[in-house]
Image: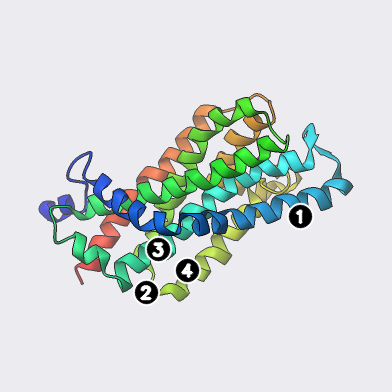
């Protein structure tokens, strides 16, 4: 039993790089289309809601509504990029393409494979979130000096949501089941976490729920920096995102082992 559990963990601190590199080499052939696809949703939210509702709403938390929204879209883009990479691309490599089967016939362990997939999904989230941050700075919705401070939060957000989505991927029998995660978890989280409007406008019960959501912690790290405001409870937000990144990783590794052993 101990040997089986060890097989679901990374063998060392660097084997995962081979998986990451394999995914990168496959991705770079369609890199432009992939980046445009990841940016489409948050950019539509940003400029349609920001310019439309922004005229009616005015200022929110001391900033223009579109600047307020831009910070929320940075975190949202990291969430969606890592989630979609994990639930669709990882599932395809595991189930349809049988890439995982080939990799597991090498010296890599299942833990190396899962960690490599996690790191690659976080990388895509980092690219998507950084692109939105640069766009926001370029059009004047945040200061250029804030970009460098936002990058670690984007990366941590990518790890957290990729790790959570790995559990869904390990449990889903087919692609059709991912729609439940999108509609019942990801979409409600977008509106409960303060991405589109302040959490303080929600009923108190929903505010309590928002305090446990990873996207809310990500936004609370990113938005104040982009708006030039002080960040409160930094340790709490970083700790929560680290918990969402680490614990689901080990759970998903165990679930993948059980699935692949069937």
**Label 4 vs 2, first from the N-terminus:** 2
Name the residue beneath numbered marker 3.
89
The disc label shown at residue 173, or none: 2
**Label 3 vs 4, first from the N-terminus:** 3
Cα separation between marks 2 and 1: 36 Å
Q: Are marks 2 and 1 in contact (CB under 8 Å)?
A: no
**Where's residue 198, x and y in %?**
72, 43
**Where's residue 146, x and y in %?**
61, 28
Quadrant position of residue 45: bottom right
The disc label shown at residue 178, or none: 4
Quadrant position of residue 138: top right
Cα separation between marks 1 and 4: 27 Å
Report helix, strand or loop for mark 4: helix
Quadrant position of the N terminus in the picture: bottom left
Q: Nearer the viewer, mark 3 or mark 4?
A: 3
Crowd rating for badge 4 (residues with CA inside 10 Å; few <14, some 14–19, many 20+): some
Crowd rating for badge 1 (residues with CA inside 10 Å; few <14, some 14–19, many 20+): few
Q: Are marks 3 and 4 in contact (CB under 8 Å)?
A: no
Front one among 4 and 54: 54
Name the residue beneath numbered marker 1.
48
């Amino acid at each position: 039993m101990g040997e089986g559990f060890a097989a679901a963990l990374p063998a060392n601190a660097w084997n995962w790089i081979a998986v990451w590199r394999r995914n990168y080499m496959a991705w770079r052939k369609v890199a432009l289309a992939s980046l445009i696809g990841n940016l489409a949703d948050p950019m539509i939210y940003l400029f349609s809601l920001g310019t439309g509702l922004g005229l009616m709403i005015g200022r929110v938390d001391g900033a223009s509504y579109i600047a307020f929204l831009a910070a929320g879209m940075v975190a949202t883009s990291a969430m969606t990029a890592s989630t979609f990479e994990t639930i669709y691309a990882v599932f395809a490599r595991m189930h349809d393409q049988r890439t995982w089967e080939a990799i597991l016939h090498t010296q890599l362990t299942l833990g190396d494979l899962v960690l490599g997939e996690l790191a690659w999904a976080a990388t895509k989230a980092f690219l998507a979130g950084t692109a939105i941050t640069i766009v926001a700075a370029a059009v004047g919705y945040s200061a250029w000096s804030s970009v460098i401070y936002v990058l670690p939060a984007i990366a941590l957000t990518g790890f957290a949501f990729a790790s959570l989505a790995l559990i869904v991927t390990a449990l889903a029998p087919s692609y059709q089941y991912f729609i439940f995660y999108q509609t019942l978890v990801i979409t409600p989280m977008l509106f409960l976490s303060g991405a589109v409007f302040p959490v303080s406008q929600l009923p108190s019960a929903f505010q309590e729920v928002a305090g446990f959501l990873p996207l809310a912690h990500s936004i609370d790290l990113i938005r104040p920096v982009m708006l030039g405001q002080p960040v409160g409870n930094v340790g709490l937000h970083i700790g929560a995102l680290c918990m969402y990144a680490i614990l689901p990783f080990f759970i998903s590794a165990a679930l993948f082992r059980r699935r692949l052993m069937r």
